[in-house]
Amino acid sequence: MDKSKITETEISIDKLIAQDRDELARFVEVYSPRIYRLAMKILNNEQDAEDVLQETFIKAIHAISGFEGRSSLSTWLYRIATNEALMLLRRHSPGTVSIDTPAEEDEEDQEALQIVDWSNQPEVKLSAKEVRLQINEAVSRLPLGQREVFALREIEGLSVKETAEILNVSESVVKTRLLRARMRLRQVLNDYFIERQKREVTDD
């Protein structure tokens, strides 16, 4: 059976609480890729992401007996992983990272961005790999709050409500941060394609 296709409902909470070794192993195998991916997007460091992955499952397995089902198993696990990533950032840079990130300013205060839709520009030969690299680099430079929201919403596919619950912020904050993240990423791609077009014109 393809482990990646095992759904959350197929993981037995009762067996996890009973510390059933086979179920614990399946739990780790099913969720490890997701937790590692999330940690990488927040931390942008393979070793740090590995540390978060390990600590997340150590803490989750230790605390599973207290899981009450008020949120989904994945939401509960993502919350542990996100907190672990933030605590690691705080250890690396004491005094610069707060787990309780304050709400951001209203979106109306943000300066409007002029974005060009480059998908319809025939002179720009789009490379999916190049674009993906540009996006990954841009995501790694997003402010922490936006990076968390983008990873949870756009990469892990969680709902606004789940993301807000994991980050302990309001749904409106999640929406604002996601909008800002998307605008930043679009601006990065906009700048990238402008420079690329200039180089291609020069080369011609």
Image (cartoon, grey):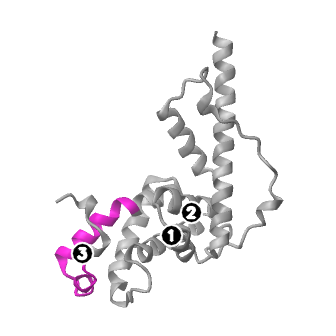
Q: Where does the image place residue 23, in percent across and percent down from the top left?
A: 21, 75
Whole-percent x, y for residue 133 in the image = 52, 39
What is the residue that sits farthest to the top in this orientation? 204
Q: Amino acid at mark 2?
A: Glu
The residue shown at (56%, 63%) is 148
- Does residue 70 show up magenta in the picture? no
Against 107, residue 117 (above or below) is: above
Q: Which residue lies at the image location 68% right of the left edge and 50% below the top edge?
A: 183
Magenta range is 11-34
Residue drawn at 69 percent across, 42 percent down: 187
Q: Residues within 10 Å of mark 1 (few under 14, many from 20)?
A: many
Q: Which residue is mark 2?
A: 148
Of 113 and 52, which appears nearest the observer? 113
Pointer 2 and pointer 1: residues touching (CB < 8 Å)?
yes
Mark 1 or 3 closer to N-term? 3
Using the rendered view, name the quadrant where residue 156 is placed.
Answer: bottom left
Q: Which residue position holds label 3?
A: 24
Earlier-in-chain disc, 2 versus 1 = 1
- Of the residues shown, which amino acid type is indicated by label 3? Leu
Question: Could you tell me which secondary element the residue under label 1 belongs to?
Answer: helix
- Residue type at the position of mark 1: Thr
The residue where tag 1 is placed is: 82
Give the class, few, some or many, for how many residues have Cα within 10 Å of label 3's Cα (few <14, many ≥20): many
